[in-house]
Image: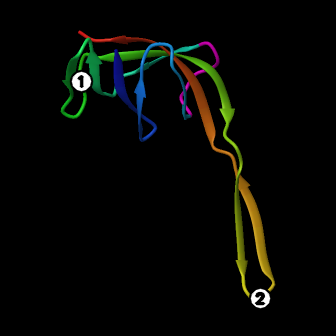
Amino acid sequence: MYAIVKTGGKQYKVSAGDVLTVEKLAGSTGDTVVLEEILMVNSEGTVDVGHPTLAQAKVTAEIISQTKAKKNIIFKSKRRKGYQKKTGHRQPITRIKIKEIQVP
């Protein structure tokens, strides 16, 4: 059994026991999160597709950690002008473990 879940503007294929890295979700380590934007569920060969989402389906997950992603380096320069600027950015992310997929 697997489901297609939308969170943080991205879509993920999840099944029970999977560990995902997603955009930051509210909560702290050990909290339970319910993902309600389920686009599709496949269970025992039966495919349910939402228009655009499935109303009764839910995916429950546990927050493993709240952390930051690897640093992205932004380097700007202009030729022959001596202008150089280097900055970085670390996106906040959440690691979650999928507990179960509930389908009515």
What is the residue that sits farthest to the right in this orientation?
A: 82
Q: What stretch of residues is rendered in magenta? A: 24-30
Mark 2 neighbour density, 10 Å: few (under 14) some (14–19) many (20 or more): few
Q: Amino acid at mark 1?
A: Leu
Q: Is residue 4 above or below residue 98?
A: below
Name the secondary structure under disc 1.
Answer: loop
Q: Quadrant of the N terminus?
A: top left
Upstream in sequence: badge 1 or badge 2: 1
Q: Quadrant of residue 51?
A: top left
14 relative position to 97: left or right: left
Residue situated in front as seen by the camera: 81 or 45: 45
Residue pointed to by mark 2: 81
Q: Amino acid at mark 2?
A: Lys
Q: Residue at x 77, y 65 (%)?
A: 86
Residue situated in front as seen by the camera: 1 or 72: 1
Q: Residue at x 34, y 23 (%)?
A: 3
Q: Is residue 51 above or below residue 101?
A: below
Q: Is residue 84 above or below residue 27?
A: below
Q: Residue at x 66, y 40 (%)?
A: 69
Pinpoint residue 32: horizontal percent, then vertical percent.
52, 13
**In the image, residue 28 lies in the stretch drawn in magenta:** yes
The answer for how far apart the CA atoms under marks 1 and 2 are is 56 Å
Mark 1 neighbour density, 10 Å: few (under 14) some (14–19) many (20 or more): some
**In the image, residue 47 lies in the stretch drawn in magenta:** no
Q: Residue at x 57, y 14 (%)?
A: 31
Residue situated in front as seen by the camera: 32 or 76: 76
Q: Quadrant of residue 47?
A: top left
Residue pointed to by mark 1: 54
77 relative position to 28: left or right: right
